[in-house]
Image (tube, helix red, strand yellow):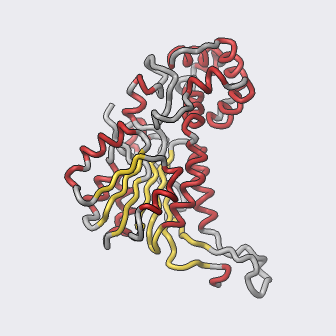
Amino acid sequence: MEHEPVLTDRVVELLVPALHGGGLFLDATLGRAGHARLVLDAAPAAQLVGIDRDPASLEESRTHLAPYEGRVRLVRDGFENLPAILERLGDAPLRGVLFDLGVSSPQLDEASRGFGYRSTGPLDMRMNPSQSLSANDVVNHYGERDLERVISRYGEERFARRIARALVDARPVGSTTELADIVKNAIPAATRRTGGHPARRTFQALRIEVNDELGALESALPAAIDALDSGGRAVVISYHSLEDRVAKRTFAEAAKGCVCPPDFPICTCGAHAVVRVLTRRPLVPTAEETERNPRARSAKLRAVEKLAEPVGGDAA
């Protein structure tokens, strides 16, 4: 399936006002450059820095971005290294940042990458094929308690203990379809009949563990806010509650001003807001978009704008 970027109108609507005067737009999850091309078209003075740790995605995006020669710089890296990447970019003002999280349609559909449970492939799931940890290591070498922790925490799977025990008992597990069958059989039959494929949550959990997706987001998002120029904007599109929780919490913390008791004559906490939240509630795709692109159905978008100067605390 061709990857279709989600919430494109909203992304352009939110990012382009910050980029009309030029400056850098950083796409931290470039993928096939679907969002990036739309932003470059709508903001012709902007320069793009596109980051991706998947070399296949980066090469494909290079082709898609050929018409924008002179305005594009591509970086093969993970966004967990954002501070170092930004340092290499020099002093150009960072005016926009986009995180479109999760796994892309081509990655899911390519059996050899091991992300999907519907076709047979190796237990891989690495977004960066050169990293050492793979799904095979997690499934076949983690202890039962660690497996349960991963499946419970990252998959929010209530049958994590049963699944972890079944996986340990079945070792060695050799393929994605074998893994999916083991998970399916570990879940009570009545539960398997509702809620989509019974292995979906476990595959999500393993992918997050292999790629340290939440840890990367927790470190990269504050770094992106820090680096934004005054009036610059950050947009995050997430696809499950754990990612959305990180974005919501990070944005709320950055938007929080003085927390001193209201009867204090002056601020002593030193806290100050550095952004304003642009999305009081997460934006979601329309019914028309989800009908056209079913993989968009779980998407949630949150956005903030960097304040010209801190508000609250010392600035009060």
Tell me the quarter of the image containing the C terminus: bottom right
The percent coordinates of residue 90 (x first, y second) are: 41, 67
Residue at left offset 39%, top offset 27% = 109
The percent coordinates of residue 287 (x first, y second) are: 40, 43
The percent coordinates of residue 96 (x first, y second) are: 41, 63
Residue 288 visible? The answer is no
Residue at left offset 52%, top offset 22% = 123
Q: Is residue 48 above or below residue 308?
A: above
Tell me the quarter of the image containing the N terminus: top left
Residue at left offset 54%, top offset 14% = 174
Which residue of the protein is positioned furthest toward the left in this rendering? Answer: 67
Along the viewing direction, whichever of 260 and 81 lies nearer the viewer: 81
Quarter of the view holding residue 64: top left
The percent coordinates of residue 245 (x first, y second) are: 61, 50
Q: Is residue 113 above or below residue 41?
A: above
Along the viewing direction, whichever of 218 and 258 lies nearer the viewer: 218
Q: Is residue 165 above or below residue 301?
A: above
The answer to whether 33 appears left or right of 80 in the picture is left
Residue 67 visible? The answer is yes
How many dots with numbers? 0
Quarter of the view holding residue 309: bottom right
Residue at left offset 32%, top offset 73% = 21
